[in-house]
Image (cartoon, rainbow, N blue to C red):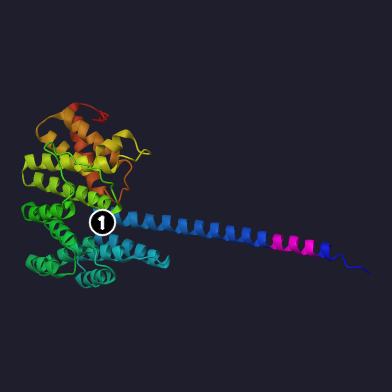
Amino acid sequence: MKVPYGCLLGFLIVTLVAVWVSITIAGWYSDARAYDDWKEAVIASYAVENDGDRLFDEGKYAEAAAKYAEYARLVEQRGEDASITIGELGRTLDLADRPEEAERHLRASLATAVRPGVCVYMAHFLARRRSPADAIAWAESIALSPEDRAIVLGVFHIERSEPEKALPHLKRLLKLVCGGDIAFDALNRLIVGPEPIGDERERRLRSTRDALDALAETSLACGDVDAARRDSAKGISVGRFIDRNLTYRSEIFRTCGSMRCRIVRARIAVAEEAWAKAAEEAAFAQAVADVEPARDVRKQKMELAALIKEIASREERAVVPVPSSR
């Protein structure tokens, strides 16, 4: 009997293809299910973190610490770095008057990565448990870049309500991030040259906006309104350039430039009782606050809400008006 090798070969090929398709589909399904499980776990952990933030803002530090500890555990279970949260846990334990645990968690976070935010937490811990001089000495001795050291010392003094001591560090920070190729004209507008904007310059532009945000706020806290106007105008100009291509955002978002600088300008307008101007600046800030992650800007959102309430009561308006896009 003649064996139909052609038919057998065809049957074998079809069978192999069917098996391959089945395995592929099963793999796709498994990957999709794993992704869904991961996403659900992330969402659940963010809810825990948000609870911790809420409790922290309410001054319930012991309860907040328990939430941050749970969140850190959930992050580590996903195989991700939880050192930032461990640093936040250390800060919260310090405020809950549990210094031994606080120091252990702060040092554990810094042993993983030396981040400016956690360095600020450690500086506050040292200032409370030892002395401000010890905190400053530690911040000046730890291995940080010049930019990060200026950030740590500047923020440390700002959070201690010492704006005059923060100003020199913030001015040094601005000089460092601007370098020799980020400059402004006489109207405080960013000078954009013909050269292409590479990734490194884009990073420094973002750092420049952050520095100008802090500098404008601190100048205003020192009572230097002219400097606050100048620095906020520069921050808005830099921000508009950075956000120029965000076509998926509203026009008011792209022309805001900087939420923090707009809040500074709104505060200046409120102090001068220029209510229409204050409303316009607050509306720009609100356009950004509406889309920024709540955790990143929760302090600014609370300040902005209070500003809007004051403006609305003076202007007898329930809603801050949408401004022109100038």
Displayed quadrant of residue 147: bottom left
Position of residue 49 in the picture relative to residue 181 (left or right)? right
Q: Would residue 159 be visible to someone looking at this image? A: no
Based on the picture, tell me whether residue 132 belongs to the magenta stretch: no
Q: Position of residue 155 (x, y in %)?
A: 15, 56
Q: Is residue 147 above or below residue 218?
A: below
CA neighbours of label 1 inside 10 A, class few (<14), some (14 to 19), many (20+)? some
Which residue corresponds to the image point at 29% horizontal and 55% vertical from the top-left? Answer: 53
Displayed quadrant of residue 193: top left
Which residue corresponds to the image point at 21% horizontal and 73% vertical from the top-left? Answer: 100
Q: Position of residue 284 (x, y in %)?
A: 25, 36
* Quarter of the rendering occupied by the C terminus: top left
Based on the picture, tell me whether residue 15 belongs to the magenta stretch: yes
* Quarter of the rendering occupied by the N terminus: bottom right
Residue position for label 1:
56
Q: Main secondary structure of the magenta part?
A: helix
